[in-house]
Amino acid sequence: MRYNLLCIFVTELCRQIMSKTDMKVTKKTFVYKTINNISIEADLFELTDNRELKPGIIWLHGGGLIFGSRTDLPEEQLNFYLANGYNVLSIDYRLAPETKLPETVNDIKDAFEWVHSNGSTLGIDSAKIFVIGHSGGAYLALISGCFEKNPPKAIVSFYGCGEIYSGWYNKSGSLYAGDILTAEEEAKKLISDSALTSASFEDRFDLFILCEEKGFWPLLVTGHNPVNEKQWYEPYCPIHNINATYPPVLLIHGDKDTYVPVEQSILLDKELESNNIRHKFIRVKNYGHAFDLLEGGLSNPDISKVFLEVIDFLNGIS
């Protein structure tokens, strides 16, 4: 009974937050980086009547670094962040395998630099820049905590991973084992001759499934063999680079995740604890990967409760 009442309260609270009749949103698109004649864009969202600097959220889409776009940000999540007093910047970054991981990470670094340099134009308080990432975007968000210059004020990781070379991903079939057989040559035809900054799941589906079937995602996104080149991977495994300067972290992970196993967040939780980093781990019971997208969104009280925890965590960072 108590749980049911709590669910009703949480859902109604989220509904009230997002149903402000006077909430009008302005969207502006910027090019935050140009490289090799490729323009990499970011969408800024803010309340139309905003007249003051606000804390900012840099939002990083998922897609295994292979697909995805800044336009993937769900509208209800965007409105929830805006209604709670944050400006939101959803960014593209160059995708694999056309662009390898070090350059993708450089895009994230450059995005942070750009936001810090242009905070007043963006209506963002440069001292309060947070990052929220989902799946592959959460992995990049966790890497951003290792940046020497202008790291985020805090990180929110939705079902992210702390390392990318051990058995959880370089073994075949973590998600679709036995379900789909993909012709390797056909899948590889989906690889472009030039860099991509966005791609739909449908356009890259066969390539994504091939990575699952063959277990060579790390090789595809890095160009390095995870079996005999582990040392190369170390700088790109945030769990091995956490130190006393690492920013606060909120880890969110469904315990039924068959894509990025919840053990990845469990290990991150332990490493953050051992380094005395302010953090919290929300283990969402009986939910899988991308639960916030696939299980009813914020109308689901379990999910709306998680998002209230996100705001509570960010608001608590001074």
Image (cartoon, rainbow, N blue to C red):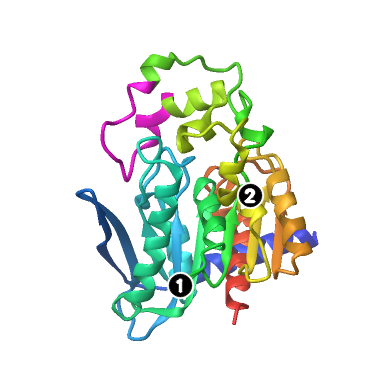
Residue 195 within the segment the image draws in magenta: yes
Q: Do residues under tags 1 and 2 come within 8 Å of each other at their CB atoms?
A: no
Q: Main secondary structure of the magenta part?
A: loop
Residue in the picture at 31% in, 61% down: 43
Residue in the picture at 66% in, 53% down: 239
How far across and down, in percent of the image, does residue 106 sit?
A: 41, 55
Question: In this orientation, which residue lies closer to the viewer: 178 or 271?
Answer: 271
**Kind of residue at badge 1:** Ala
Position of 294 with respect to 240 (left or right) is: left
How crowded pointer 1 is (Cα within 10 Å; few <14, some 14-19, many 20+) is rated as some
Residue 115 within the segment the image draws in magenta: no
Residue 56 image label: none
Q: Which residue is mark 2?
A: 162
The residue segment tinted magenta is: 188-206
Q: Which residue is mark 1?
A: 83
Dot 1: element: helix
State whether residue 160 is above or below residue 96: below
